[in-house]
Image (cartoon, helix red, strand yellow):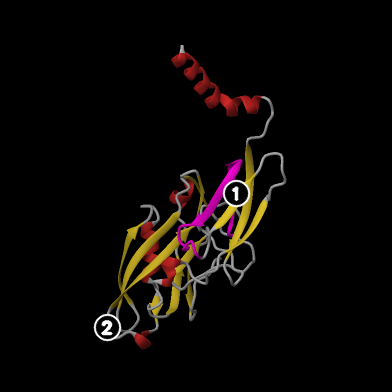
């Protein structure tokens, strides 16, 4: 009898959300927001983690630094995988039948992402290339980051390029773009290795004309044709 009662109780507990839905009681909350750095620049392709009771829900910011997510009511801790928690850690409470924030304006106390900070000793970029977004990759919504390691000679020219991570359909176009990069030879004493990151955004949202996080060795690709840009010091979104 005890086992029978316990089983019934567990079934009722598991079915509670469905019962609530049938009665018209809202159990989820639609939350949106934007993440900027200290300069007021939105941060695209930032992986966010909403932690609750040793579980986490993942989402990623779009080309405009914005995100949307559906959460159950409760308490959450929001972190980002490329920002240390002492620079970005947000406590969020979503309550039922109480006013809740629908759009969060969040600021990370950083100027550079952790992966970009490690590239501070690289030679200055004087020419970069934005890769094509291959139609085959777009058709299956392949996106994300492709990491390409390039060797740079004393003249600032790329002598070799190899994609070491990223979707297979995005690697060839990234390697082609990486080979078109040129670097300032002023401080290059010997052949050196540089890591370039090409971030392919699969979001259908148009890029707004707003300040956007950029870095010389990180190129955001938002469905634009390949272009080569002369005499610049940083990559930008088109």
For the residue pair 62 and 28, the one nearer the viewer reads as 28
Query: Principal SS element in the magenta part?
Result: strand
What is the number of the mark on residue 112?
A: none
- Circle 1: element type: strand
Quarter that holds the C terminus: bottom right
* Residue 233: in magenta span: no
Q: Residue at x 56, y 48 (%)?
A: 76
Relative to residue 96, is residue 207 depicted above or below? below
> Residue lying furthest left in this view?
190
Sequence-wise, the earlier of marks 1 and 2 is 1
**Magenta-drawn segment:** 64-86
Specify whether residue 12 is in view: yes
Relative to residue 104, is residue 20 depicted above or below? above
- Circle 2: element type: loop
Q: Quadrant of residue 193?
A: bottom left
- Check disc 2: other Cα within 10 Å, few if <14, some if 14-19, many if 20+: few
Residue 213 pos. (x, y %): 54, 68
> Residue lying furthest front in this view?
2
* Residue 70: in magenta span: yes
For the residue pair 172 and 81, the one nearer the viewer reads as 81
Look at mark 2 in the image and give the residue it sits on: 190
Left or right position of 42 against 218: right
Relative to residue 11, is residue 215 depicted above or below? below
Q: Nearer the viewer, mark 1 or mark 2?
A: 1
Look at mark 1 in the image and give the residue it sits on: 68
**In the rendered picture of this protein, how many numbered marks are placed on residues?**
2
- Check disc 1: other Cα within 10 Å, few if <14, some if 14-19, many if 20+: some
Residue 30 pos. (x, y %): 64, 44
Q: Residue at x 64, y 28 (%)?
A: 20
Left or right position of 157 against 117: left
């Amino acid at each position: 009898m005890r086992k029978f009662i316990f089983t019934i109780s567990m079934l009722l507990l598991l079915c509670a959300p469905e019962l609530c839905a049938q009665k018209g009681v809202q159990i989820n909350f639609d939350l949106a927001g934007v993440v900027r750095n200290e300069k007021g620049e939105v941060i695209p392709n930032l992986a966010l983690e909403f932690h609750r009771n040793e579980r986490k829900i993942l989402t990623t910011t779009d080309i405009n630094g914005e995100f949307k997510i559906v959460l159950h009511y409760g308490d959450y801790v929001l972190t980002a995988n490329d920002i240390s928690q002492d620079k970005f850690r947000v406590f969020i409470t979503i309550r039922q039948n109480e006013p809740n924030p629908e759009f969060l304006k969040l600021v990370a106390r950083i100027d550079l992402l952790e992966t970009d900070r490690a590239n501070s000793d690289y030679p200055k970029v004087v020419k970069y290339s934005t890769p094509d977004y291959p139609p085959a990759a777009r058709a299956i919504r392949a996106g994300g980051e492709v990491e390409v390691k390039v060797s740079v000679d004393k003249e600032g020219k790329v002598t070799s390029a190899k994609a070491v991570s990223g979707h297979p359909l995005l690697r060839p176009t990234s390697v082609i773009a990486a080979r078109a990069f040129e670097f300032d030879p002023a401080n290059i004493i010997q052949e050196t290795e540089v890591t370039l990151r090409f971030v392919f955004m699969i979001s259908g949202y148009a890029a707004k004309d707003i300040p956007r996080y950029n870095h010389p060795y990180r190129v955001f690709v938002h469905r634009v044709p390949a272009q080569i840009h002369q005499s610049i010091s940083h990559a930008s979104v088109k």
